[in-house]
Image (cartoon, grey):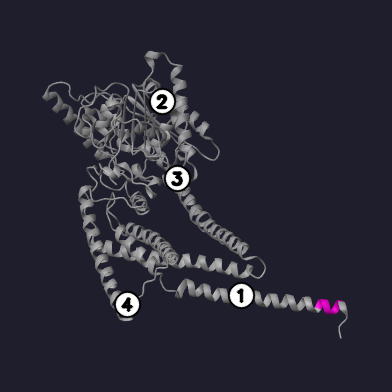
Protein backbone atom coordinates (compact mmCIF):
# COMPACT_ATOMS: atom_id res chain seq x y z
CA UNK A 1 0.00 0.00 0.00
CA UNK A 2 1.22 3.49 -0.87
CA UNK A 3 0.78 6.47 1.42
CA UNK A 4 -1.24 9.52 0.28
CA UNK A 5 1.64 11.57 -1.09
CA UNK A 6 3.18 8.52 -2.69
CA UNK A 7 -0.14 7.57 -4.24
CA UNK A 8 -0.58 11.11 -5.62
CA UNK A 9 2.94 11.13 -7.05
CA UNK A 10 2.38 7.73 -8.62
CA UNK A 11 -0.91 8.91 -10.16
CA UNK A 12 0.69 12.06 -11.58
CA UNK A 13 3.52 9.99 -13.03
CA UNK A 14 1.08 7.62 -14.69
CA UNK A 15 -0.92 10.58 -16.01
CA UNK A 16 2.18 12.28 -17.41
CA UNK A 17 3.35 9.03 -18.92
CA UNK A 18 -0.03 8.47 -20.47
CA UNK A 19 -0.08 12.02 -21.86
CA UNK A 20 3.37 11.54 -23.36
CA UNK A 21 2.28 8.26 -24.90
CA UNK A 22 -0.85 9.91 -26.34
CA UNK A 23 1.23 12.79 -27.68
CA UNK A 24 3.76 10.44 -29.27
CA UNK A 25 0.92 8.44 -30.77
CA UNK A 26 -0.75 11.59 -32.09
CA UNK A 27 2.48 12.89 -33.57
CA UNK A 28 3.35 9.51 -35.06
CA UNK A 29 -0.13 9.11 -36.51
CA UNK A 30 -0.18 12.66 -37.83
CA UNK A 31 3.29 12.23 -39.29
CA UNK A 32 2.14 9.13 -41.12
CA UNK A 33 -0.93 10.94 -42.36
CA UNK A 34 1.23 13.91 -43.40
CA UNK A 35 3.44 11.64 -45.49
CA UNK A 36 0.40 10.11 -47.12
CA UNK A 37 -1.05 13.56 -47.83
CA UNK A 38 2.22 14.92 -49.18
CA UNK A 39 3.18 11.94 -51.32
CA UNK A 40 0.46 9.38 -51.86
CA UNK A 41 -2.76 11.41 -51.87
CA UNK A 42 -4.42 11.64 -55.29
CA UNK A 43 -4.72 14.91 -57.16
CA UNK A 44 -7.81 16.97 -56.47
CA UNK A 45 -10.09 16.81 -59.53
CA UNK A 46 -10.90 20.51 -59.47
CA UNK A 47 -7.26 21.38 -58.88
CA UNK A 48 -6.14 19.17 -61.76
CA UNK A 49 -8.60 20.82 -64.15
CA UNK A 50 -7.57 24.27 -62.94
CA UNK A 51 -3.88 23.46 -63.40
CA UNK A 52 -4.56 22.16 -66.91
CA UNK A 53 -6.38 25.34 -67.94
CA UNK A 54 -3.63 27.51 -66.44
CA UNK A 55 -0.99 25.48 -68.30
CA UNK A 56 -2.82 26.06 -71.59
CA UNK A 57 -2.89 29.80 -70.92
CA UNK A 58 0.79 29.89 -69.88
CA UNK A 59 1.85 28.87 -73.38
CA UNK A 60 0.31 32.07 -74.74
CA UNK A 61 2.79 34.70 -76.00
CA UNK A 62 4.42 37.45 -73.95
CA UNK A 63 6.89 40.19 -74.97
CA UNK A 64 10.08 38.28 -75.76
CA UNK A 65 11.16 34.82 -76.98
CA UNK A 66 11.45 32.28 -74.17
CA UNK A 67 14.41 30.20 -73.13
CA UNK A 68 13.83 26.77 -71.57
CA UNK A 69 13.83 28.16 -68.03
CA UNK A 70 11.37 30.90 -68.99
CA UNK A 71 9.02 28.16 -70.20
CA UNK A 72 9.55 26.39 -66.90
CA UNK A 73 8.76 29.47 -64.79
CA UNK A 74 5.63 30.29 -66.80
CA UNK A 75 4.20 26.79 -66.76
CA UNK A 76 5.21 25.95 -63.18
CA UNK A 77 3.83 29.09 -61.53
CA UNK A 78 0.72 29.07 -63.71
CA UNK A 79 -0.12 25.48 -62.78
CA UNK A 80 0.32 26.23 -59.09
CA UNK A 81 -2.12 29.13 -59.42
CA UNK A 82 -4.51 27.04 -61.49
CA UNK A 83 -4.45 24.14 -59.06
CA UNK A 84 -5.20 26.36 -56.07
CA UNK A 85 -8.00 28.12 -57.97
CA UNK A 86 -9.45 24.78 -59.07
CA UNK A 87 -9.50 23.41 -55.52
CA UNK A 88 -11.26 26.53 -54.23
CA UNK A 89 -13.73 26.47 -57.12
CA UNK A 90 -14.60 22.79 -56.48
CA UNK A 91 -15.22 23.45 -52.80
CA UNK A 92 -17.37 26.47 -53.61
CA UNK A 93 -19.45 24.52 -56.13
CA UNK A 94 -19.95 21.68 -53.64
CA UNK A 95 -20.98 24.12 -50.93
CA UNK A 96 -23.52 25.82 -53.21
CA UNK A 97 -24.85 22.47 -54.44
CA UNK A 98 -25.24 21.28 -50.86
CA UNK A 99 -27.08 24.43 -49.87
CA UNK A 100 -29.63 24.16 -52.67
CA UNK A 101 -29.93 20.37 -52.40
CA UNK A 102 -28.55 19.66 -55.87
CA UNK A 103 -27.20 16.15 -56.44
CA UNK A 104 -25.86 14.68 -59.69
CA UNK A 105 -25.72 10.90 -60.11
CA UNK A 106 -23.84 9.29 -63.01
CA UNK A 107 -24.20 5.63 -63.86
CA UNK A 108 -20.95 3.64 -63.46
CA UNK A 109 -20.72 2.73 -67.18
CA UNK A 110 -21.31 6.35 -68.18
CA UNK A 111 -18.73 7.49 -65.64
CA UNK A 112 -16.01 5.39 -67.31
CA UNK A 113 -16.86 6.72 -70.76
CA UNK A 114 -16.92 10.27 -69.40
CA UNK A 115 -13.45 9.82 -67.92
CA UNK A 116 -12.03 8.55 -71.21
CA UNK A 117 -13.69 11.37 -73.13
CA UNK A 118 -12.35 13.92 -70.63
CA UNK A 119 -8.84 12.47 -70.82
CA UNK A 120 -8.90 12.60 -74.61
CA UNK A 121 -10.11 16.21 -74.53
CA UNK A 122 -7.37 17.20 -72.08
CA UNK A 123 -4.66 15.59 -74.19
CA UNK A 124 -6.01 17.17 -77.37
CA UNK A 125 -6.34 20.68 -75.93
CA UNK A 126 -2.95 20.47 -74.23
CA UNK A 127 -1.26 19.40 -77.47
CA UNK A 128 -3.00 22.13 -79.46
CA UNK A 129 -2.13 24.88 -76.95
CA UNK A 130 1.51 23.77 -76.80
CA UNK A 131 1.93 23.70 -80.58
CA UNK A 132 0.20 27.06 -80.88
CA UNK A 133 2.49 28.44 -78.17
CA UNK A 134 5.60 27.26 -80.01
CA UNK A 135 4.40 28.90 -83.23
CA UNK A 136 3.75 32.16 -81.36
CA UNK A 137 7.30 32.03 -80.02
CA UNK A 138 8.59 31.94 -83.57
CA UNK A 139 6.49 34.97 -84.42
CA UNK A 140 7.87 36.88 -81.42
CA UNK A 141 11.44 35.98 -82.42
CA UNK A 142 10.90 37.48 -85.87
CA UNK A 143 9.37 40.64 -84.38
CA UNK A 144 12.45 41.31 -82.24
CA UNK A 145 14.80 40.20 -85.03
CA UNK A 146 16.10 37.04 -83.38
CA UNK A 147 16.59 33.49 -84.56
CA UNK A 148 13.76 31.25 -83.28
CA UNK A 149 14.62 28.83 -80.49
CA UNK A 150 14.98 25.15 -81.28
CA UNK A 151 12.16 22.69 -80.60
CA UNK A 152 14.27 21.11 -77.84
CA UNK A 153 14.14 24.41 -75.92
CA UNK A 154 10.35 24.26 -75.76
CA UNK A 155 10.26 20.56 -74.86
CA UNK A 156 12.82 20.83 -72.05
CA UNK A 157 11.19 23.98 -70.69
CA UNK A 158 7.74 22.42 -70.65
CA UNK A 159 9.06 19.34 -68.81
CA UNK A 160 10.84 21.58 -66.30
CA UNK A 161 7.65 23.54 -65.71
CA UNK A 162 5.66 20.36 -65.08
CA UNK A 163 8.30 19.10 -62.65
CA UNK A 164 8.37 22.44 -60.83
CA UNK A 165 4.58 22.46 -60.42
CA UNK A 166 4.60 18.92 -59.01
CA UNK A 167 7.35 19.90 -56.59
CA UNK A 168 5.32 22.91 -55.50
CA UNK A 169 2.31 20.63 -54.96
CA UNK A 170 4.31 18.34 -52.69
CA UNK A 171 5.63 21.39 -50.83
CA UNK A 172 2.11 22.77 -50.36
CA UNK A 173 0.90 19.44 -49.03
CA UNK A 174 3.83 19.35 -46.64
CA UNK A 175 2.66 22.69 -45.28
CA UNK A 176 -0.84 21.24 -44.83
CA UNK A 177 0.66 18.23 -43.06
CA UNK A 178 2.52 20.59 -40.72
CA UNK A 179 -0.77 22.27 -39.85
CA UNK A 180 -2.31 18.87 -39.11
CA UNK A 181 0.66 18.03 -36.88
CA UNK A 182 0.24 21.19 -34.82
CA UNK A 183 -3.50 20.59 -34.60
CA UNK A 184 -2.98 17.04 -33.30
CA UNK A 185 -0.49 18.25 -30.70
CA UNK A 186 -2.81 20.97 -29.40
CA UNK A 187 -6.19 19.22 -29.62
CA UNK A 188 -6.02 17.41 -26.22
CA UNK A 189 -5.34 20.64 -24.34
CA UNK A 190 -7.23 23.48 -26.06
CA UNK A 191 -10.74 24.23 -27.34
CA UNK A 192 -11.36 23.45 -31.06
CA UNK A 193 -11.51 27.09 -32.20
CA UNK A 194 -8.32 27.96 -30.38
CA UNK A 195 -6.63 24.89 -31.87
CA UNK A 196 -7.53 25.99 -35.41
CA UNK A 197 -6.27 29.54 -34.95
CA UNK A 198 -3.11 28.58 -33.07
CA UNK A 199 -2.18 25.80 -35.51
CA UNK A 200 -2.59 28.24 -38.39
CA UNK A 201 -0.34 30.79 -36.70
CA UNK A 202 2.30 28.18 -35.86
CA UNK A 203 2.28 26.89 -39.44
CA UNK A 204 2.66 30.41 -40.83
CA UNK A 205 5.55 31.04 -38.42
CA UNK A 206 7.24 27.79 -39.43
CA UNK A 207 6.96 28.62 -43.13
CA UNK A 208 8.24 32.15 -42.48
CA UNK A 209 11.28 30.90 -40.55
CA UNK A 210 12.17 28.25 -43.14
CA UNK A 211 11.71 30.72 -46.00
CA UNK A 212 13.82 33.34 -44.22
CA UNK A 213 16.61 30.83 -43.59
CA UNK A 214 16.59 29.63 -47.19
CA UNK A 215 16.06 32.89 -49.06
CA UNK A 216 17.69 35.50 -46.87
CA UNK A 217 20.14 33.25 -45.07
CA UNK A 218 21.29 31.28 -48.11
CA UNK A 219 20.17 32.70 -51.45
CA UNK A 220 20.25 36.41 -50.65
CA UNK A 221 23.55 36.33 -48.81
CA UNK A 222 25.09 34.31 -51.63
CA UNK A 223 23.89 36.88 -54.16
CA UNK A 224 25.31 39.73 -52.09
CA UNK A 225 28.67 37.97 -51.75
CA UNK A 226 28.85 37.31 -55.48
CA UNK A 227 27.92 40.92 -56.28
CA UNK A 228 30.63 42.22 -53.94
CA UNK A 229 33.21 39.88 -55.46
CA UNK A 230 32.26 40.95 -59.00
CA UNK A 231 32.58 44.60 -58.02
CA UNK A 232 36.10 44.08 -56.68
CA UNK A 233 37.28 42.10 -59.69
CA UNK A 234 39.93 43.92 -61.72
CA UNK A 235 39.79 42.50 -65.24
CA UNK A 236 42.97 42.47 -67.36
CA UNK A 237 40.72 43.20 -70.36
CA UNK A 238 39.82 46.62 -68.92
CA UNK A 239 42.92 48.86 -69.22
CA UNK A 240 43.53 51.72 -66.84
CA UNK A 241 43.05 55.06 -68.65
CA UNK A 242 46.15 57.02 -69.58
CA UNK A 243 44.33 60.35 -69.91
CA UNK A 244 44.23 62.68 -66.88
CA UNK A 245 40.69 63.57 -67.98
CA UNK A 246 39.43 60.18 -66.77
CA UNK A 247 38.87 59.14 -63.17
CA UNK A 248 41.34 56.47 -62.13
CA UNK A 249 43.93 57.77 -64.58
CA UNK A 250 47.04 59.93 -64.03
CA UNK A 251 46.53 62.75 -61.47
CA UNK A 252 43.07 61.40 -60.58
CA UNK A 253 41.88 61.81 -57.00
CA UNK A 254 40.11 58.45 -57.31
CA UNK A 255 42.21 55.29 -57.30
CA UNK A 256 41.71 52.66 -59.98
CA UNK A 257 40.69 50.08 -57.39
CA UNK A 258 38.11 52.33 -55.73
CA UNK A 259 35.98 52.80 -58.84
CA UNK A 260 34.40 49.33 -58.80
CA UNK A 261 34.14 47.03 -61.81
CA UNK A 262 31.40 49.01 -63.66
CA UNK A 263 33.20 52.31 -62.99
CA UNK A 264 36.47 50.95 -64.36
CA UNK A 265 34.71 49.86 -67.56
CA UNK A 266 33.09 53.26 -67.95
CA UNK A 267 36.23 55.37 -67.61
CA UNK A 268 38.30 53.04 -69.79
CA UNK A 269 35.71 52.90 -72.60
CA UNK A 270 34.64 55.29 -75.31
CA UNK A 271 36.46 56.94 -78.20
CA UNK A 272 39.52 59.11 -78.01
CA UNK A 273 39.94 62.55 -79.59
CA UNK A 274 41.43 61.22 -82.84
CA UNK A 275 38.55 58.82 -83.61
CA UNK A 276 35.98 61.51 -82.85
CA UNK A 277 37.81 63.97 -85.09
CA UNK A 278 37.86 61.52 -88.02
CA UNK A 279 34.19 60.65 -87.56
CA UNK A 280 32.62 64.10 -87.17
CA UNK A 281 34.92 65.87 -89.65
CA UNK A 282 36.19 68.62 -87.33
CA UNK A 283 38.80 69.01 -84.61
CA UNK A 284 37.62 67.42 -81.39
CA UNK A 285 38.57 67.65 -77.74
CA UNK A 286 39.40 64.74 -75.46
CA UNK A 287 36.11 63.90 -73.63
CA UNK A 288 35.99 64.04 -69.85
CA UNK A 289 34.61 61.08 -67.92
CA UNK A 290 34.54 61.20 -64.12
CA UNK A 291 33.25 58.59 -61.72
CA UNK A 292 33.24 57.92 -57.98
CA UNK A 293 32.04 54.90 -56.01
CA UNK A 294 30.50 54.58 -52.57
CA UNK A 295 32.32 52.24 -50.19
CA UNK A 296 32.08 50.98 -46.63
CA UNK A 297 34.27 53.86 -45.48
CA UNK A 298 32.61 56.55 -47.61
CA UNK A 299 29.00 57.71 -47.46
CA UNK A 300 26.92 58.70 -50.45
CA UNK A 301 27.40 62.38 -49.52
CA UNK A 302 31.18 61.91 -49.39
CA UNK A 303 31.08 60.10 -52.73
CA UNK A 304 29.21 63.03 -54.29
CA UNK A 305 31.79 65.45 -52.90
CA UNK A 306 34.56 63.28 -54.38
CA UNK A 307 32.88 63.46 -57.78
CA UNK A 308 32.66 67.27 -57.59
CA UNK A 309 36.39 67.31 -56.80
CA UNK A 310 37.01 65.25 -59.94
CA UNK A 311 34.93 67.68 -62.00
CA UNK A 312 37.02 70.54 -60.58
CA UNK A 313 40.28 68.73 -61.27
CA UNK A 314 39.48 67.92 -64.91
CA UNK A 315 38.14 71.39 -65.76
CA UNK A 316 34.71 69.99 -66.59
CA UNK A 317 33.03 73.34 -65.86
CA UNK A 318 34.74 74.83 -68.92
CA UNK A 319 33.17 72.33 -71.32
CA UNK A 320 30.14 73.14 -73.43
CA UNK A 321 28.01 70.26 -72.13
CA UNK A 322 27.87 68.52 -68.76
CA UNK A 323 25.75 65.34 -68.45
CA UNK A 324 24.93 63.74 -65.10
CA UNK A 325 24.11 60.03 -65.27
CA UNK A 326 22.36 58.02 -62.58
CA UNK A 327 23.48 54.42 -62.97
CA UNK A 328 21.72 51.11 -62.46
CA UNK A 329 22.11 49.10 -59.27
CA UNK A 330 25.67 48.02 -60.03
CA UNK A 331 26.68 51.48 -61.25
CA UNK A 332 26.51 50.44 -64.90
CA UNK A 333 25.95 53.07 -67.64
CA UNK A 334 24.94 52.55 -71.25
CA UNK A 335 28.00 53.06 -73.48
CA UNK A 336 25.84 53.96 -76.47
CA UNK A 337 24.47 56.95 -74.57
CA UNK A 338 27.86 58.08 -73.29
CA UNK A 339 29.54 57.82 -76.68
CA UNK A 340 26.66 59.49 -78.53
CA UNK A 341 27.15 62.62 -76.41
CA UNK A 342 30.91 62.63 -76.96
CA UNK A 343 30.68 62.29 -80.75
CA UNK A 344 27.82 64.78 -81.15
CA UNK A 345 29.65 67.45 -79.13
CA UNK A 346 33.03 66.68 -80.75
CA UNK A 347 34.37 65.84 -77.31
CA UNK A 348 33.46 69.24 -75.85
CA UNK A 349 31.64 67.59 -72.94
CA UNK A 350 31.97 65.97 -69.53
CA UNK A 351 29.97 63.04 -68.21
CA UNK A 352 29.74 62.21 -64.52
CA UNK A 353 28.19 59.50 -62.35
CA UNK A 354 28.48 57.84 -58.96
CA UNK A 355 28.10 54.23 -57.90
CA UNK A 356 25.61 54.08 -55.05
CA UNK A 357 25.48 50.27 -54.87
CA UNK A 358 27.13 47.19 -56.35
CA UNK A 359 24.00 45.02 -56.22
CA UNK A 360 22.19 44.09 -59.45
CA UNK A 361 19.18 46.32 -60.18
CA UNK A 362 16.48 43.79 -59.17
CA UNK A 363 18.24 43.18 -55.85
CA UNK A 364 18.78 46.92 -55.29
CA UNK A 365 15.11 47.55 -55.97
CA UNK A 366 14.09 44.91 -53.42
CA UNK A 367 16.49 45.70 -50.56
CA UNK A 368 17.53 49.34 -51.06
CA UNK A 369 15.12 51.30 -53.24
CA UNK A 370 16.02 54.65 -51.68
CA UNK A 371 19.69 54.68 -52.69
CA UNK A 372 19.15 55.38 -56.43
CA UNK A 373 16.75 58.20 -55.53
CA UNK A 374 19.21 59.71 -53.05
CA UNK A 375 22.03 59.40 -55.56
CA UNK A 376 20.02 61.26 -58.22
CA UNK A 377 19.10 64.09 -55.85
CA UNK A 378 22.52 64.47 -54.24
CA UNK A 379 24.36 64.54 -57.56
CA UNK A 380 22.10 67.14 -59.17
CA UNK A 381 21.96 69.36 -56.07
CA UNK A 382 25.74 69.33 -55.66
CA UNK A 383 26.36 70.21 -59.31
CA UNK A 384 23.75 72.97 -59.28
CA UNK A 385 25.37 74.54 -56.20
CA UNK A 386 28.75 74.46 -57.94
CA UNK A 387 27.34 75.95 -61.13
CA UNK A 388 25.71 78.76 -59.16
CA UNK A 389 29.20 79.87 -58.10
CA UNK A 390 30.23 80.38 -61.75
CA UNK A 391 29.41 83.39 -63.94
CA UNK A 392 26.28 82.74 -66.02
CA UNK A 393 28.22 82.97 -69.31
CA UNK A 394 30.73 80.34 -68.19
CA UNK A 395 28.33 77.62 -67.13
CA UNK A 396 28.06 74.49 -69.27
CA UNK A 397 24.66 73.34 -70.45
CA UNK A 398 23.39 70.83 -67.88
CA UNK A 399 21.74 67.57 -68.96
CA UNK A 400 20.66 64.51 -66.99
CA UNK A 401 20.16 60.91 -68.05
CA UNK A 402 19.52 57.43 -66.75
CA UNK A 403 18.43 54.01 -67.89
CA UNK A 404 16.20 51.53 -66.09
CA UNK A 405 16.76 51.89 -62.33
CA UNK A 406 18.99 54.84 -63.20
CA UNK A 407 16.01 56.56 -64.80
CA UNK A 408 13.96 55.82 -61.69
CA UNK A 409 16.65 57.32 -59.44
CA UNK A 410 17.57 60.24 -61.69
CA UNK A 411 14.01 61.50 -61.94
CA UNK A 412 13.74 61.51 -58.14
CA UNK A 413 15.85 64.68 -58.21
CA UNK A 414 12.73 66.58 -59.29
CA UNK A 415 9.49 67.12 -57.35
CA UNK A 416 7.44 67.53 -60.50
CA UNK A 417 7.63 68.18 -64.24
CA UNK A 418 7.79 72.01 -64.03
CA UNK A 419 10.82 71.76 -61.73
CA UNK A 420 12.55 69.41 -64.19
CA UNK A 421 11.93 71.74 -67.12
CA UNK A 422 13.11 74.81 -65.19
CA UNK A 423 16.24 73.20 -63.73
CA UNK A 424 18.04 71.50 -66.62
CA UNK A 425 18.73 72.01 -70.32
CA UNK A 426 17.56 68.56 -71.35
CA UNK A 427 17.20 64.92 -70.36
CA UNK A 428 17.13 61.43 -71.81
CA UNK A 429 15.36 58.72 -69.82
CA UNK A 430 15.45 55.21 -71.26
CA UNK A 431 13.60 52.10 -70.16
CA UNK A 432 11.83 53.95 -67.35
CA UNK A 433 10.08 51.60 -64.87
CA UNK A 434 6.35 52.23 -64.58
CA UNK A 435 6.67 52.82 -60.81
CA UNK A 436 8.64 56.06 -61.35
CA UNK A 437 6.61 58.89 -59.71
CA UNK A 438 7.51 61.58 -62.27
CA UNK A 439 6.56 59.28 -65.13
CA UNK A 440 3.23 58.56 -63.47
CA UNK A 441 2.60 62.31 -63.24
CA UNK A 442 3.25 62.68 -66.96
CA UNK A 443 1.05 59.81 -68.11
CA UNK A 444 -1.79 61.01 -65.90
CA UNK A 445 -1.90 64.22 -67.97
CA UNK A 446 -1.26 62.76 -71.41
CA UNK A 447 -3.52 63.49 -74.36
CA UNK A 448 -6.70 61.35 -74.30
CA UNK A 449 -6.60 58.79 -77.06
CA UNK A 450 -2.82 58.69 -77.33
CA UNK A 451 -1.37 55.18 -77.01
CA UNK A 452 -0.06 53.97 -73.67
CA UNK A 453 3.19 52.84 -75.31
CA UNK A 454 3.89 56.42 -76.43
CA UNK A 455 1.63 58.95 -74.69
CA UNK A 456 1.57 62.49 -76.08
CA UNK A 457 2.53 65.07 -73.45
CA UNK A 458 1.49 68.69 -74.09
CA UNK A 459 1.60 68.11 -77.87
CA UNK A 460 5.33 67.33 -77.62
CA UNK A 461 6.46 70.89 -76.90
CA UNK A 462 9.13 69.86 -74.39
CA UNK A 463 8.64 66.16 -73.73
CA UNK A 464 8.38 63.39 -76.29
CA UNK A 465 7.95 59.66 -75.71
CA UNK A 466 9.59 57.61 -78.43
CA UNK A 467 9.49 53.90 -79.21
CA UNK A 468 11.80 54.32 -82.23
CA UNK A 469 13.69 57.27 -83.77
CA UNK A 470 10.88 58.30 -86.13
CA UNK A 471 8.75 59.16 -83.07
CA UNK A 472 11.08 62.11 -82.50
CA UNK A 473 9.53 63.92 -85.46
CA UNK A 474 5.97 62.57 -85.51
CA UNK A 475 3.90 60.96 -82.81
CA UNK A 476 3.17 57.24 -82.73
CA UNK A 477 0.10 57.65 -84.95
CA UNK A 478 2.05 59.72 -87.48
CA UNK A 479 0.61 63.11 -86.49
CA UNK A 480 2.63 66.29 -86.08
CA UNK A 481 3.81 67.62 -82.75
CA UNK A 482 3.79 71.25 -81.73
CA UNK A 483 7.12 73.01 -82.44
CA UNK A 484 9.81 71.52 -80.21
CA UNK A 485 11.00 73.96 -77.57
CA UNK A 486 13.95 73.88 -75.18
CA UNK A 487 14.60 72.26 -72.79
CA UNK A 488 13.95 68.97 -74.56
CA UNK A 489 13.23 65.75 -72.68
CA UNK A 490 12.96 62.32 -74.30
CA UNK A 491 11.50 59.20 -72.75
CA UNK A 492 12.66 56.22 -74.82
CA UNK A 493 10.78 52.96 -74.30
CA UNK A 494 10.26 49.94 -76.50
CA UNK A 495 6.82 48.31 -76.57
CA UNK A 496 8.63 44.98 -76.00
CA UNK A 497 10.56 46.19 -72.92
CA UNK A 498 9.28 44.24 -69.87
CA UNK A 499 11.15 46.54 -67.46
CA UNK A 500 8.93 49.41 -68.60
CA UNK A 501 5.66 47.51 -68.21
CA UNK A 502 6.33 45.41 -65.13
CA UNK A 503 3.89 46.35 -62.38
CA UNK A 504 2.33 44.57 -59.42
CA UNK A 505 -1.15 45.47 -60.68
CA UNK A 506 -0.65 43.01 -63.55
CA UNK A 507 -1.72 40.38 -61.05
CA UNK A 508 -5.32 41.61 -61.00
CA UNK A 509 -5.81 44.32 -63.66
CA UNK A 510 -5.36 44.49 -67.43
CA UNK A 511 -3.05 47.41 -68.32
CA UNK A 512 -3.90 49.94 -71.02
CA UNK A 513 -0.80 49.13 -73.09
CA UNK A 514 -1.87 45.51 -73.38
CA UNK A 515 -5.54 46.27 -73.88
CA UNK A 516 -4.71 48.54 -76.84
CA UNK A 517 -2.34 46.01 -78.50
CA UNK A 518 -0.54 48.60 -80.64
CA UNK A 519 3.15 47.93 -79.92
CA UNK A 520 4.94 47.52 -83.24
CA UNK A 521 7.29 44.78 -81.95
CA UNK A 522 4.72 42.97 -79.77
CA UNK A 523 2.43 40.29 -81.17
CA UNK A 524 -1.26 41.33 -81.18
CA UNK A 525 -2.04 37.79 -80.00
CA UNK A 526 -0.80 38.65 -76.50
CA UNK A 527 -3.62 38.74 -73.94
CA UNK A 528 -3.92 39.52 -70.25
CA UNK A 529 -4.75 36.85 -67.68
CA UNK A 530 -4.83 37.31 -63.89
CA UNK A 531 -1.62 36.16 -62.16
CA UNK A 532 -0.25 34.48 -65.31
CA UNK A 533 0.62 37.65 -67.26
CA UNK A 534 2.50 39.03 -64.26
CA UNK A 535 4.84 36.04 -64.20
CA UNK A 536 5.18 36.04 -67.98
CA UNK A 537 6.47 39.63 -67.90
CA UNK A 538 8.65 38.85 -64.87
CA UNK A 539 10.24 35.94 -66.73
CA UNK A 540 10.90 38.21 -69.72
CA UNK A 541 12.89 40.70 -67.66
CA UNK A 542 16.23 38.95 -66.90
CA UNK A 543 17.19 38.45 -70.56
CA UNK A 544 15.53 41.59 -71.94
CA UNK A 545 18.91 43.34 -72.18
CA UNK A 546 20.27 40.49 -74.33
CA UNK A 547 17.93 40.98 -77.28
CA UNK A 548 18.89 42.93 -80.35
CA UNK A 549 19.15 46.72 -80.01
CA UNK A 550 15.86 48.50 -80.66
CA UNK A 551 13.84 45.86 -78.80
CA UNK A 552 13.38 44.68 -75.23
CA UNK A 553 15.57 46.56 -72.75
CA UNK A 554 18.37 47.14 -75.30
CA UNK A 555 18.72 50.81 -76.26
CA UNK A 556 21.59 51.10 -78.71
CA UNK A 557 21.67 52.86 -82.08
CA UNK A 558 18.61 55.00 -81.38
CA UNK A 559 20.56 56.84 -78.68
CA UNK A 560 22.45 58.78 -81.37
CA UNK A 561 19.43 60.48 -83.01
CA UNK A 562 17.77 60.86 -79.60
CA UNK A 563 20.73 62.73 -78.12
CA UNK A 564 21.09 64.74 -81.33
CA UNK A 565 17.50 65.92 -80.93
CA UNK A 566 17.88 66.75 -77.22
CA UNK A 567 21.11 68.67 -77.90
CA UNK A 568 19.38 70.55 -80.72
CA UNK A 569 21.51 68.96 -83.46
CA UNK A 570 18.81 66.91 -85.16
CA UNK A 571 18.05 69.36 -87.99
CA UNK A 572 14.68 67.68 -88.47
CA UNK A 573 12.45 69.54 -90.88
CA UNK A 574 15.09 72.23 -91.46
CA UNK A 575 17.19 72.96 -94.52
CA UNK A 576 17.04 71.48 -97.98
CA UNK A 577 16.61 67.80 -98.73
CA UNK A 578 20.32 67.56 -99.50
CA UNK A 579 21.15 69.04 -96.08
CA UNK A 580 18.84 66.57 -94.38
CA UNK A 581 20.48 63.71 -96.25
CA UNK A 582 23.90 64.96 -95.11
CA UNK A 583 22.61 65.07 -91.52
CA UNK A 584 21.44 61.45 -91.73
CA UNK A 585 24.80 60.36 -93.17
CA UNK A 586 26.58 62.16 -90.33
CA UNK A 587 24.48 60.40 -87.71
CA UNK A 588 25.02 57.08 -89.51
CA UNK A 589 28.79 57.58 -89.40
CA UNK A 590 28.60 58.16 -85.64
CA UNK A 591 26.52 55.01 -85.17
CA UNK A 592 29.07 52.97 -87.13
CA UNK A 593 31.96 54.39 -85.11
CA UNK A 594 30.29 53.62 -81.78
CA UNK A 595 29.48 50.10 -82.90
CA UNK A 596 33.18 49.47 -83.58
CA UNK A 597 34.24 50.44 -80.04
CA UNK A 598 31.25 49.00 -78.15
CA UNK A 599 31.22 45.31 -77.18
CA UNK A 600 28.08 43.66 -78.49
CA UNK A 601 25.91 41.67 -76.04
522 or 387, which is in the foreground? Answer: 522
Mark 4 surroundings within 10 Å by alpha-carbon count, few (fewer than 14), some (14 through 19), many (20 or more): few
- Residue 273: tell me if it is visible: no
Residue wearing tag 4: 111
In-image side of 419 versus 583 (left or right): right
Residue wearing tag 3: 231
Real-space CA distance between mark 3 and mark 1, rounded to the nearest whole angstrom: 54 Å
Mark 2 or mark 3: which is in front? 3
Q: Secondary structure at mark 1?
A: helix
Q: From the image, which quarter does the N terminus lie in?
A: bottom right
Q: Quadrant of residue 361?
A: top left
Q: Secondary structure at mark 2?
A: helix
Residue wearing tag 1: 26
In the rendering, at what x and y percent does residue 11 appear?
79, 78
Q: Secondary structure at mark 4?
A: helix
Real-space CA distance between mark 4 and mark 1, rounded to the nearest whole angstrom: 38 Å
Q: Magenta segment, which residues?
A: 5-9
Real-space CA distance between mark 4 and mark 3, rounded to the nearest whole angstrom: 64 Å
In the rendering, at what x and y percent does residue 211 appear?
52, 58
Residue drawn at x 33%, y 64% as measured from the top left: 52
Q: Earlier in the sequence, mark 4 or mark 1?
A: 1
Q: Earlier in the sequence, mark 2 or mark 4?
A: 4
Is residue 288 shown above or below 167? Answer: above
Q: Earlier in the sequence, mark 2 or mark 3?
A: 3
Mark 3 or mark 1: which is in front? 1
Mark 2 or mark 1: which is in front? 1
Amino acid sequence: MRSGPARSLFSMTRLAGGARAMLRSAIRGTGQRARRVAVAAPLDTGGFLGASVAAWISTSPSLLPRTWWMWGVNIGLSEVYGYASGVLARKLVRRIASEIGLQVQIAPDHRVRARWAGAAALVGISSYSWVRGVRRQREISHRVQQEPKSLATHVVGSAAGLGASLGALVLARSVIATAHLYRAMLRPYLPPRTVRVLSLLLTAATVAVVTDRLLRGRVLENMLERAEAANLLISPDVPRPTSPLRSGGPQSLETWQSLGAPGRKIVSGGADRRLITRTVGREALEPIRVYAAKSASRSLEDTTAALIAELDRTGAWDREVLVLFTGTGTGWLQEWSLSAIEFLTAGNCATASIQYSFYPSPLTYLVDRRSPQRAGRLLLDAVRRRLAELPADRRPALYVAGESLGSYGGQAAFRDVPEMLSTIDGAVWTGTPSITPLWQQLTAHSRPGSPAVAPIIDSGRNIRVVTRPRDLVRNYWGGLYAPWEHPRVVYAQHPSDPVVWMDLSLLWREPAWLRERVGHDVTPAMRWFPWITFWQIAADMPLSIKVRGGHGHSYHEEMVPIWAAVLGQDGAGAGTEAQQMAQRRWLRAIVDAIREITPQP
